[in-house]
Image (cartoon, grey):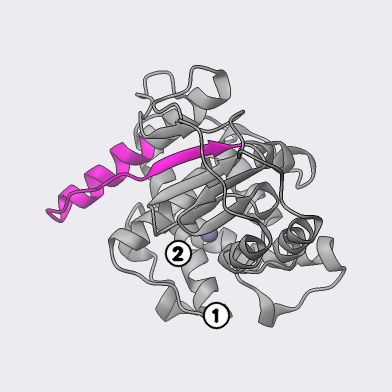
Amino acid sequence: MQLGDQRASGNVEDRRGIGMVGGGLGVGGIVIAVIAYFLGFDPGTAIDVAQQVAPQREMQAVPKGAPADEMGQFVAKVLGSTEVVWGGIFQQSNRQYRPPTLVLYDGQVRSACGLGQAAMGPFYCPGDQKLYIDLAFFRDLQTRFQAPGDFAQAYVIAHEVGHHVQNLTGTTRTDSNQGSVRMELQADCYAGVWGHHAGTLKQLEAGDIAEALNAATAIGDDRLQKRGQGRVVPESFTHGSSEQRVHWFKRGLDSGQPKACDTGSAL
Ligand SMILES: [Zn+2]
């Protein structure tokens, strides 16, 4: 990506290295969260379960604003780019975009949705309108999922921002797996919408789109299930297959229009 001219967003809480006061999760909680992640369950479910295992703890004061380190700057600039793009899109329909806060953390974090675990991957909590990202996931994306590249990482952030857009526009999650898949594919499509406009802002480089498509393929439910349990169970999909994720990301990318992301009618 070419983010040199992009303003870094100040809507970042850097909880890296702060951790949570007191001991860690019990082994049971970690096992539950890891299993839930690999089976592709909704992270919210895993948080609920994990929270029952972990006692309440206090948080330390958290630094706010764009972090100074390279990775923190990258994340803050991608977030800044999503603010520019979604701000413009909302403005076109005379609405104001209220940006989310991005929380960087290590290992585990307390959110309004319960206890977040790095093993669950990045998540968005509608209750506090924050995106939670453990940078270890970006390393995983590169090594375990073989999806390297800065735009692959940006796609993950833009997908979580997509969930925030759903929250602002009143799209609510249903409990069924199919409802969850629709929401996830729409978030992928919204990530593509952002990618389209990032391209217009000259923030994309050759190879960036391929990185995102590769990442969408790598974290499809079918691919994850095959890695996690050796077989594919489509009824338990919560994010969609690799092919579906690629399809919807491209739809947003090609059109640049949120209204192209009508996954409800298309599934
Ligand atoms: Zn999602």
Q: Quadrant of residue 164?
A: bottom left
Percent of width and height locating residue 254: 42, 53
> What kind of element bears circle 2?
helix
Q: Residue at x 75, y 78 (%)?
A: 233
Percent of width and height locating residue 155: 53, 45
Please provide the residue range marked out in magenta.
81-105
Q: Residue at x 53, y 58 (%)?
A: 114
Q: Which residue is mark 2?
A: 186
For residue 148, above or below residue 25? above
Contact between labelled residues 2 and 1, with CB atoms less than 8 Å apart = no
User: As shown in the figure, which amino acid type bears the numbered disc 1?
Assistant: Gln
Is 197 displayed left or right of 33 in the figure? left
User: As shown in the figure, which amino acid type bears the numbered disc 2?
Assistant: Gln
For residue 266, above or below residue 98? below
Residue 175 forms part of the magenta stretch: no
Residue 88 forms part of the magenta stretch: yes
Asked if disc 2 is less than 8 Å from ligand 1, the answer is no
Percent of width and height locating residue 90: 22, 51
Is 93 displayed left or right of 140 in the figure? left
Q: Which residue is mark 1?
A: 178
Residue that sits furthest to the left in the current view = 94
204 or 159, nearer to the observer: 159
Q: Is residue 204 visible?
A: no
